[in-house]
Image (cartoon, helix red, strand yellow):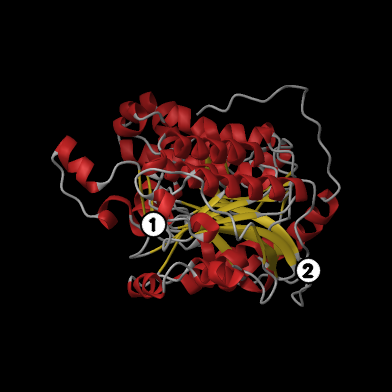
Amino acid sequence: MHAEAHAGPDPKATAAQHARGKLTARERIELLLDEGSFTEVEPLRRHRASGFGLEHRKPYTDGVVTGWGTVEGRQVFVYAHDFRIFGGALGESHAAKIHKLMDLAEAAGAPLVSLCDGAGARIQEGVTALAGYGGIFQRNARSSGVIPQISVILGPCAGGAAYSPALTDFTFMVRGVAQMFITGPDVVQAVTGEQVSMDGLGGADVHSGVSGVCAFAYDDEASCLEDVRHLLSYLPANNRQAPPVVPTDDPADRRCERLAELVPVDPARGYDVRAVIAEIVDDGEFFEVQPTWATNVVCALTRIDGHTAGIVANQPLSLAGVLDINASEKAARFVSFCDAFNIPLVTMLDVPGFLPGVDQEHKGIIRHGAKLLYAYCNATVPRIQLIMRKAYGGAYIVMDSRSVGTDLSFAWPTNEIAVMGAEGAANVIFRRQIAAADDPEATRAQMVKEYRAELMHPYYAAERGLVDDVIDPAETRATLASSLAMLRTKHRALPQRKHGITPL
């Protein structure tokens, strides 16, 4: 029986899966887990439904392989839909296996990875299949912030099935084989008249670059699953543990002389903040989350002196690094995740403000920007703010300023912290003098110079205690490493409450 369960329903079904460019459920588990570490749960489970011919088709596993193993020696729970059996569709027994595994993962305090390749609810089982999804969603929500939950989309994921990945922490997708949507192309065309392909509606590039549903997109399953392993290496097993420490030969006090070259002094000139991050962190390595969505902010997991840290940084190469609706949501979710799993936060500022415009206001930039503000205000992990160049207006406050609770704030000598840029401020404050002057342009230039000298010089915020120190950029890594080491034992208790109300 075990041999039959392992082999699958039919060699032709396996050949058909491979012909689609897809691996089988067990092949995927073998790529994800350390060799020989997988222990399966309920391989002999079968459904007990009848009608519509189901009583004559009772394959072992019921279309989902469940169990646990290790990734780099650390315990991980995994379930994988088997598209060869009922198209991976979820029925009562199929759901019961997943429920059991999710309960085991929560009880054991270990990450859960779901390998999704299923055709949705098993129509022949009716409402019992739908109830099975409800049980998964309820467990996703209960385990949120307790154990890391990762979804990997390796085939269709439609209708109610799409909500479980949406409830997890990170979603991976593979181009060409993975699609996620609530209603498929046929329904869309029937209702709206729009014609769209499966990939055009819910493919990996759509969700990684347009909707923001997917955090990572890949060309093949092997590289996708390898990066799932890589992501897990940064994360603790659960919210009661610290992330793993990885020894490094990169000295904590290494000077970063290149930073002066990487970041232009002129606040109007762009640069790639990812190069700045690489210069500061261990061995230049970091793992960027949602790299193709809301590209005006960079969110990344990395290590500083061997310890995991989360980086949130404005990206001057995209929209000049302004905060908009998508960037606020992206950063807020990342900050909340890091806070839940004891990952310190380093926020790197070079931000001209929030993106102005009727479209942004009408779509609720106030509400969406408040999500990021709420996430920072609610975070209890060590938090450090680094102001590299400019930090203007409400965006300065929202990006983890001292006033919203960052533990330490450092600034480079080129920093400018103000309500707005000098040009805009001078136009507001001195508009009458400028208008009445014989040479308005010369007067405006003089007023801009005076405003910058009075209120925007690098030491203005430090003199008022809003910046802890103005540091040499070359000392940034050493400063961050020593500060994070000091804050490692930080403890902050929030007021007693059931939960806060996130401005969704």
Q: Do we see residue 104 in this rendering? A: yes
The kind of residue on which mark 2 rests is Asp
Quarter of the rendering occupied by the N terminus: bottom right
Q: State the image coordinates of residue 502 (x, y, percent, origin top left).
A: 57, 28
Mark with earlier residue (2, 1): 1
The kind of residue on which mark 1 rests is Gly
The foreground one among 391 and 41 is 41
Q: State the image coordinates of residue 43 (x, y, percent, origin top left).
A: 61, 61
Q: Quadrant of residue 161?
A: top left
Q: What is the residue that sits farthest to the top in this orientation?
A: 497
> For the residue labelled by badge 2, is the local secondary structure a helix, a strand or a loop?
loop
Tell whether 87 sits left or right of 75: left
Residue, disc 2:
253
**In the rendering, which numbered label is found on residue 18?**
none
Q: Quadrant of residue 36?
A: bottom right
Task: Give the residue drawn at x 40%, y 37%.
Answer: 126
Q: Do we see residue 115 in this rendering? A: no
Vertical comparison of 453 with 17: above or below: above
Residue, disc 1:
87
Crowd rating for badge 2 (residues with CA inside 10 Å; few <14, some 14–19, many 20+): some
Q: What is the residue that sits farthest to the left in this orientation?
A: 193
Q: State the image coordinates of residue 386 (x, y, percent, origin top left).
A: 65, 51
Count the labels in the image. Answer: 2
C-alpha span from label 2 to label 1: 55 Å
